[in-house]
Image (cartoon, rainbow, N blue to C red):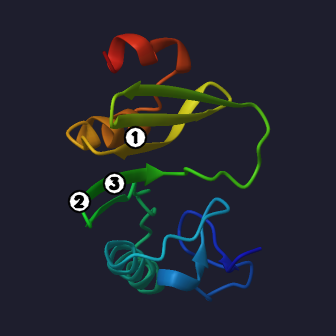
């Protein structure tokens, strides 16, 4: 494990003990970003108060703009397990798109140079886009 393993209520295997933020491992992932720390802290706090609240998964999008390079990534671009992976790549000159699918479902995406499809990638990950729909979705 990478962190403190929690369930969808951010509860550990010990009763009345919760974890949130950078130390909480949810579904085999740790999201070490500020927005996730805020959301998981709030959810864990509500559950500690007895207000049963399920953690809403977040698809983080990360932008990098440095030295003339523009890069966007979302979801899992380096999956822990390489089982049943498919990759869809689209290269148009300097513009590149890479979409990672596991078990036929979109789990991550990467854009280089033209990042205009970033929100479309996040939405497709949230909606669990199937591999057979990728061509019509990302024309």
| Mark 2: few/some/many CA within 10 Å (<14, 14-19, 20+) | few
Quick one: 70 or 1, which is closer to the camera? 70
Q: Which residue is mark 3?
A: 71
Examine the rendered structure and indicate whether residue 71 appears above or below residue 86: below
Q: Earlier in the sequence, mark 3 or mark 1?
A: 3
Q: Residue at x 67, y 62 (%)?
A: 28
Q: Is residue 55 left or right of residue 87?
A: left
Residue 50: where, in percent of width, then height?
A: 44, 80
- Separation of disc 2 and disc 3 at Cα? 10 Å
Residue 127 position by quadrant: top left
Q: Secondary structure at mark 2?
A: loop
Q: Secondary structure at mark 3?
A: strand
Extreme left residue here?
Answer: 116
Quick one: 36 or 43, which is closer to the camera? 36
Residue 124: where, in percent of width, then height?
A: 37, 33
- Separation of disc 3 and disc 1 at Cα? 20 Å
Residue 51: where, in percent of width, then height?
A: 39, 74
Examine the rendered structure and indicate whether residue 40 appears above or below residue 67: below
Quick one: 73 or 124, which is closer to the camera? 73
Quadrant of image for the N terminus: bottom right
Q: Which residue is mark 2?
A: 68
Q: Is residue 35 left or right of residue 12?
A: left
Q: Residue at x 24, y 40 (%)?
A: 114
Q: Which residue is mark 1?
A: 126
- Can the viewer see residue 20 in this picture? no
Residue 67: where, in percent of width, then height?
A: 26, 67
Q: Is residue 39 left or right of residue 82?
A: left
- Separation of disc 1 and disc 2 at Cα? 30 Å
Examine the rendered structure and indicate whether residue 137 appears above or below residue 61: above
Quadrant of image for the C terminus: top left
Residue 109 position by quadrant: top left
- Can the viewer see residue 119 in this picture? yes
């Amino acid at each position: 494990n990478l962190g403190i393993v929690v369930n969808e209520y951010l509860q550990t295997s010990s009763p009345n003990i919760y974890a949130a933020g950078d130390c909480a491992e949810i579904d085999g992932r740790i999201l070490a970003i500020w927005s996730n720390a805020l959301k998981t802290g709030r959810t864990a706090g509500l559950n500690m108060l007895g207000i049963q609240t399920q953690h809403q998964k977040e698809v983080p999008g990360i932008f990098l703009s440095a030295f003339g390079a523009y890069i966007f990534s979302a979801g899992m671009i380096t999956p822990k397990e390489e089982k049943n992976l498919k990759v869809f790549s689209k290269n148009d000159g300097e513009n590149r798109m890479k979409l990672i699918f596991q078990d036929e479902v979109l789990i991550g995406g990467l854009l280089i140079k033209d990042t205009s499809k970033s929100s479309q990638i996040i939405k497709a990950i949230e909606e669990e886009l199937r591999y057979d729909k990728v061509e019509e979705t990302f024309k």
